[in-house]
Image: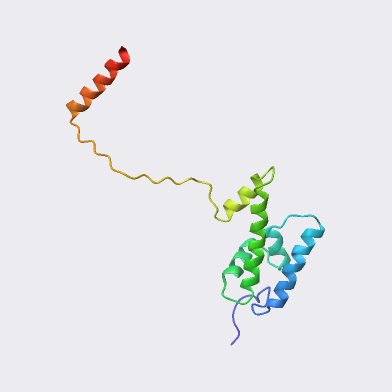
Amino acid sequence: MAKAGRKPKNDPNDVDAIQKKIDAYFQSAIEGERPYTFSGLALALGYFSRTQLWENSKRNTPISEPIKKAMMKIEEAYEERLHGNTPTGAIFALKNRGWQDKQEVEHSGTITDKLTKEERKARIDALKAKLDR
C-alpha cells in the first residue's frame, strides 16, 4: 500500500545529492557576493519555506546531518557579523535562532524584616529628622 502525502523534495537517504545542493548554494552565494541565509538554503534545497528546512533538519534521516551542518555554517556567518560595524541584522537573525541578550542575575540571601509597624515608623522618622538637619 502506498504512503499518503506528497513525495519528499529530497530523498531522505541520498546524502550525496543533498550535499551537492548545499555546496552549490554556498558557492553561488560566494560568487554572487551574497550573505548566507536560511531562506536561500531552503530555496536551494527545493523547499518552499524555512519551516521545511527546520523540519528536515530535525528528522532522523541521513540527510538531516548535512542540513544541520549547513544551518550551523549560516549561523556562524551571523556570529562573525556581530564583530562588524553594523551587527543589528545579525543580532536579529540570531535572536530568531534562540539566542538571547538578556542578563540573568542571581540573588542570594534572605530578607529578615521583623520590625513592627511602630519600629518601622520610628526608623522612618529618624531618617527624616537626619534629612531635615
Q: Nearer the viewer, residue 41 or 46?
A: 41
The residue at 36%/44% (across/down) is 107
Horizontal and vertical percent position of residue 39 = 68, 59
Q: In which quadrant of the rendered view does residue 8 lie?
A: bottom right
In the rendered view, tell whether residue 1 sits above or below residue 105: below
| Horizontal side, residue 8 vs residue 133: left or right | right
Q: In which quadrant of the rendered view does residue 2 lie?
A: bottom right
What kind of colouring is applied to the model shown? rainbow
In the rendered view, tell whether residue 84 sits above or below residue 59: above
Q: Nearer the viewer, residue 35 or 41?
A: 35
Q: Quadrant of the C terminus?
A: top left
The residue at 59%/67% (across/down) is 55
In the rendered view, tell whether residue 87 sits above or below residue 16: above
| Horizontal side, residue 54 vs residue 115: left or right | right
Q: Quadrant of the N terminus?
A: bottom right
The residue at 74%/70% (across/down) is 21
Q: Nearer the viewer, residue 3 or 79?
A: 79
The residue at 75%/63% (across/down) is 26
Horizontal and vertical percent position of residue 36 = 71, 57
In the rendered view, tell whether residue 47 sits above or below residue 99: below
Q: In which quadrant of the rendered view does residue 15 lie?
A: bottom right
Which residue reaches farthest top? 133
Q: Nearer the viewer, residue 100 or 52?
A: 100
Which residue reaches farthest right? 31
